[in-house]
Image (tube, grey):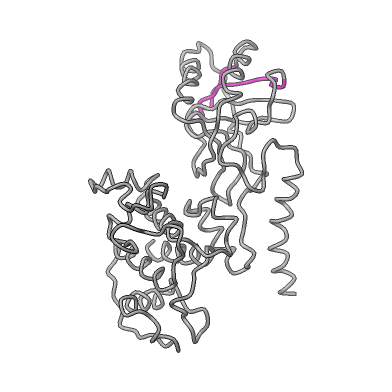
Amino acid sequence: MIKIKRLFKIIVPTVLLLMLALTAHAYNVVDLPENMTFSDALGVFNADEITRITVSDIAEGKYTDLTKDEINEFYSTIQDMTVYRKINPTPFRGISVNIYTNDGVKSYMLNSGLQIGMYGSNNYVCYKLNKANTEKLLYLDSMYRDAEEKVNGEEIHRVTSNDFLKLPSSPWAQPFAREAASKNILPYEFTGNYSENITREQFCILLANLICVKENYSSLDKYMQDQNKPYLKNYFVDCNDADDSVNILYALGIVNGKDESHFDPDGTITREEAATLLCKVAEMYMWIGTETSLTYNDTDLISPWAKFFVTWANEYGIMTGITEEEFNPQGQYTVEQAVATIVRLYNLLS
C-alpha cells in the first residue's frame, strides 16, 4: 500500500503535465520556453478573437473599458513583442490589462507580466515584456488615471488550473522541491534535471537565491549595491557567460576558484565542497561551531580543510551521510540533494 501511494504521488503530477500538453497551446507546456511572442503566451492570434479589454487598478478595484479601436491598437502593438519567463510570488499589483475572449480572460500586469499558471503552491509563472516594450504600454496607465468614469468591480484574474512545477521522481525529494519553489529558491530551469549532478555554477545560483530570499531582495546584485559591497564581474576567465552569483559569492568569500583565474562553472561539486559552502553561507547569519565528532566509517577520507564544515552540516541536519555508515565526501552531488540541503539551511536560518 505504501509503495502504491508513493507511485501515485509520482504519477499524478506527470499525468497532469501530459494532460496540459495535450491542451491547445502555442508553446511547450512541459518545458516552458524562456521567451516567446506575446500572442503565443496569450493564445490570441487575431484582434477579432478579443471580445473585450478592461484596464484596471488592482488596489482600487475599478476599471475602464477600451473601445474596439483601442483594442485593435493594443493588439497591433503587442502581438509580435517578446515576453520573458519570470517566476513571481506577488504578480497581482498595479495596473492590469484584462483581455477577454470566448475562452475566458487573461490579465497582463504592467509590473509583472502575463500570469499563465502556478509554480507550486505560492508562486506564479508569468511572461513579461522587457523594460523598453513595457514603456510602450504605459499609455494604458495614463488612460486609466485620466478616465472620467471608472466602474467598480473588476476582479483579479488568476490562472490556477495549470501548475508548471515539475517534481523529482524521488519521493523523498518532492517536499523539498515544493518548499524551494514556494520560497522562490528553485529556478524553473533546474526542475528538469533533478537526478543530474549539480554544477558549481548551479550551486552558486541556489546559494544566491537563498541569500536573496533571506534578505528580501529580488537579486543578489541589488543586495550588494545596497550593502555597498563592490565586486568584479568576470573575475574568472572562464565565467564570461556565467551567472553573476559566481562573482558575487566569490566577493563575499563564500566560494573560491579552482585556481586564481579559473572557476570551472560547469564542473561538478563534491559533497564535502557543498557542505563547506553551506556552512559559509550560514556563517553570514549565525555563529558556527561544533563540539561533536563524525562517526562515519569514511571520516578519514574527508579533506582536512572540509572536516569542520562537514561536521557542522551533519550536526545540524543540513547534510547527512548517504547511509548511516558512509558520508562519501568525494562523491558527486545531485540537483535534488542540493535543493534539499538548501531548504534545510533556509529553515535553520529562519
Residue 25 found in image quarter: top right
Q: Residue 184's x, y, as percent?
A: 48, 51
Dominant secondary-structure state across the stretch colored magenta? strand
Number of numbered discs visible in the structure rendering: 0
Pick the residue in front: 30 or 123. Answer: 30
Quadrant including the N terminus? bottom right
Q: Which residues are magenta?
A: 49-65
x 40%, y 59%: residue: 264
- Drawn side of residue 8 relative to residue 116, left or right: right
Q: Magenta includes 208?
A: no
Residue 307 found in image quarter: bottom left
x 52%, y 44%: residue: 87
Pick the residue in front: 212 or 132. Answer: 132
Seen in the picture, residue 220 relative to 175 is either above or below; the reply is above
x 46%, y 77%: residue: 320
- Drawn side of residue 301 relative to residue 326, left or right: left
Pick the residue in front: 320 or 103. Answer: 320
- Drawn side of residue 272 relative to residue 333, left or right: left
Residue 176 found in image quarter: bottom right
Quadrant including the C terminus? bottom left
Pick the residue in front: 172 or 194. Answer: 194
Seen in the picture, residue 63 relative to 111 is either above or below; the reply is above
Q: Residue 130's x, y, as percent?
A: 47, 31
x 33%, y 61%: residue: 257
